[in-house]
Image: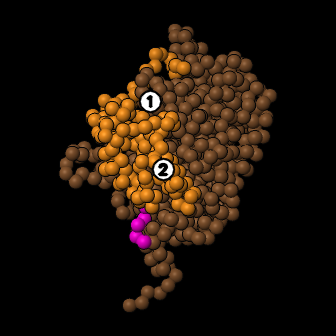
Chain colours: A orange, B brown
Amino acid sequence: MAVSAIKEYKGENKDRVENFHGAQLLYIGWEDHLMFCAPFAFPFPPQMRFGDVIEKVLPGTYGYHPDWARVDWSKVEWFKSGQPWTPNFNRSLAENGLGHKDVIRFRTPGLAGIGGSCS
Amino acid sequence: MDMKAAPKHKMGLKERYAAMTRGLDWETSYQPMDKVYPFDKYEGIVIHDWDKWQDPFRLTMDAYWKYQAEKERKLYAIIDAYAQNNGHLNVTDARYINTVKLFLQGVTPLEYMAHRGFAHVGRALRGPGPRIACQMQALDELRHAQTQVHAMSNYNRYYNGLHDWRHMYERVWYLSVPKSFFEDAVSAGPFEFLVAVGFSFEYVLTNLLFVPFVSGAAYNGDMNTMTFGFSAQSDEARHMTLGLECIKFLLEQDPANVPIVQRWLDKWCWRGVRLLSLVAMMMDYMLPKRVMSWKEAWEMYFEEAGGALFKDLARYGIREPKCMQQVRLEKDHLSHQVWTTFYNYGAAAAFHTWIPDADEMDWLSQKYPESFDKYYRPRMEYWREQAALGNRYYNKTLPMLCQTCQIPMLFTEPGDPTKICYRETSYLGDKFHFCSDHCKEIFEYEPEKYIQAWLPVHQIYQGNCFEPGTDPTAPGFDPLAAVLQHYHLNFGRDNLDFEGSEDQRNFAAWKGAVTRNQVG
C-alpha cells in the first residue's frame, strides 16, 4: 500500500548497501543457544571468505559459550532465510550467494545450550 | 466600544462548556476551509458533524488552569521536602534507581513528544470541541514532561546515568524503540495519531505503563516518583476518557471509518505491546520490592479490562486487535527475554543490570511456573557462576534489529520459546527483517515509511554514531568506546553490572552515614 499522504510520498531507504562503505550486512543466528539474546548483525566485504567468518569472527562472538569449543563443523546444519543451505567455506560470501542483509542460521546437532535448555 | 452586558445568571457546567468550546471560529470567505485544515480528510476518515464530539468532563480552559495550578503547588511542595530530607536514601535498594533512569530516558521524552503530537493534531482538526480537548492534553503532556524532569533531577545529584537523557534519547540504541514508536505516530495523520496515542496507548495500555511505575515507586519508598505519578493521574483519567470518546466519535460518524480504525487498532496495540516490553522487565527484574508480576498485570489490565472494552466496541463492528493471541503466548516469556537482552548488552546501557538473587529467582519460578525454571533459570545461573569467577558476560557484537519496532530480534516463535522468530520481506530489491508477523504486516502496509527507519545498529556500521573527527581506521580503534562517547555514556559509571558500581558503593556509604556512627 502507498502511505496515505497529502501529496506524493517517497521514503529513502536508510540501509542501502552503498551506505556501508564497501561492506554488506550479514545476519547470523546460532539455533538453540539463546544465551545470545538475538541473532547478530555484521558488516562484511562481499569478497570475504566464508570460512573466515566462522574461524576468525565468530569465536569472538560465541566463544563465551561452553558449547562453542565442542562444535563439529562437519555436522553443522545451515539455513538461509530459514531454508536448508550449504555454504562453501573456501568461497567468498558473494560466491556463496550471500547478498546484503541476508540472514543465515546454523544448528549444531547434539548441542542444545546450558543443560539442554536452549540457553 | 460597545460591549454586551455580561449575562446575569451564572452559567451551569453544560452551558459553560458550550460557550467555551463551540462557535469560536468562523467560516473563511477568501480561502476554502479545506486549505485552512488540510490534514483532516486525507486519511479517509469521514466526519459529518463535529459537534457530536463531547468532552465527558466538560472541561473548559478557565477550570483547567485552576485545577492544574493547585496540583502543581502540592507536587512541588512534596518534591522539595523529598530533596531536603534526603528522600533518595529511603528507597529499598540502590538497584531501584535504575527504574527511574529507565523512566527518564525512555518515557519522559515521550511525554514531550505527546505534547507536540497533540498540539499538532489540535491545529489540524476543524471541530472546535476536539481541538480544545487536544490543546488541554498537549498542555498536560508538557506538564508531565516538566514535572518528571524536575522530580527526577533529585536523583541526578547522587546517581549516575541521569545526566544527559535528552541527548541519549536521540542516539542510544534501546531508546530508538520508544523514539521510533512516537515518531511513527506523530508523522501519521491526525486521526491515526488520536487512535495510536489517544486511544491505544492512553486508554488500552496506559495502566500497564503508569500503574507499574507509580506502584513500583510506592512499594520501593520512592515518594518522589509516586508524587509526580499521582499528580499526572487525574490527567491520565481524563486522557483515557477522551481516548474512548474519540474512538466512539469516529466509529459513530460513518461506517467507512470502521475498517480504517480497526487497522490502526491492530497496528497500534501491537506497537504498544512491543514498547511495553520495557515495563515487563522493569516489573519482574528491576523493582527490588515487586508489585505483581508482569504476567499478572497483563492479565488484569489487558486481558480482562481490554477484553471487556473490545466486547463493548463490538457493536460498532470492531473486533479485538489481531495480536491478542500472540501476546497471550508471550506473557510467560517477555520479561525474561528482555531483561537477559539488557544483561547481554549491559556495557552499552545507561543503567545497571544484574542477575536476580536466589530469592528473586524463586519468586520468578513461582510467578512463571511454565517458563522460568525450564528456559531462563539455566542461563542466569550460568551467568551468575561465571560472574563469580570474574567472567561476567558482556555481549560485544551488535544484534540484528526488527525493522518496525527496532527491538533486537529477541522474541521467540509464538508457542516455541526455543526458537527465535524470524520474518522477512523484500521491497524494491532490498531485504527487510522483522521480529513478528505483526511488525512485518505494519511494514508491508506502508513500506515507504519504514524503509526510512534509523536502526541504531546499522547506523553504527555506517559510521554515523561517532563523534566528529573520530577515525575508525586508526590502529587500536575501539568502536564500542567510540559509540558510548557519542552517547555521552560514561563508561564504568553509567553502565556495567550493578554489582561493583559507584551507585551501589555510594548508596551503601550514605545509608551507613545516616544510621551508624563514624569512628576515627
Q: Which mark is residue B431?
A: 1
Chain under callout 2: A
Q: Which mark is residue A108?
A: 2
| Distance (Cα) linking label 1 and label 2 | 26 Å
Q: Is residue B393 covered in magenta?
A: yes
B453 over A68 or under it: above or below: above
Q: Can you give x and y, in whole percent of width and height, for residue A117 in the image?
A: 57, 57
Query: Does residue B92 appear to the left or right of B385 in the view shown?
Result: right
Q: Do marks 1 and 2 share a chain?
A: no
Q: Is residue B245 visible?
A: yes
The quadrant in which the N terminus of chain B is found is top right
Q: Residue B493's image quarter? A: bottom left
The quadrant in which the C terminus of chain B is found is bottom left
A30 over B12 or under it: above or below: below
Q: Residue B82's image quarter? A: bottom right
Task: Provide the residue span drawn in magenta.
Answer: B389-394
Magenta span: chief secondary structure: loop
Q: Can you give x and y, in whole percent of width and height, for residue B280 in the image?
A: 60, 52
Query: Does residue B172 appear to the left or right of B279 in the view shown?
Result: left
Q: Amino acid at mark 2?
A: Thr
Q: Is residue B184 visible?
A: no
Look at the numbered discs 1 and 2 and tell me whether their residues touch, using CB distance below 8 Å: no
Question: B365 or B77, which is in the foreground?
Answer: B365
> Which residue of the protein is positioned furthest toward the bottom in this rendering?
B520
What crowding class fits label 2: few (fewer than 14 Cα within 10 Å), some (14-19), or many (20 or more)?
many
- Secondary structure under tag 1 reads strand
Query: Does residue B121 appear to the left or right of B204 in the view shown?
Result: left
Q: Can you give x and y, in whole percent of width and height, for residue B162 in the image?
A: 43, 57
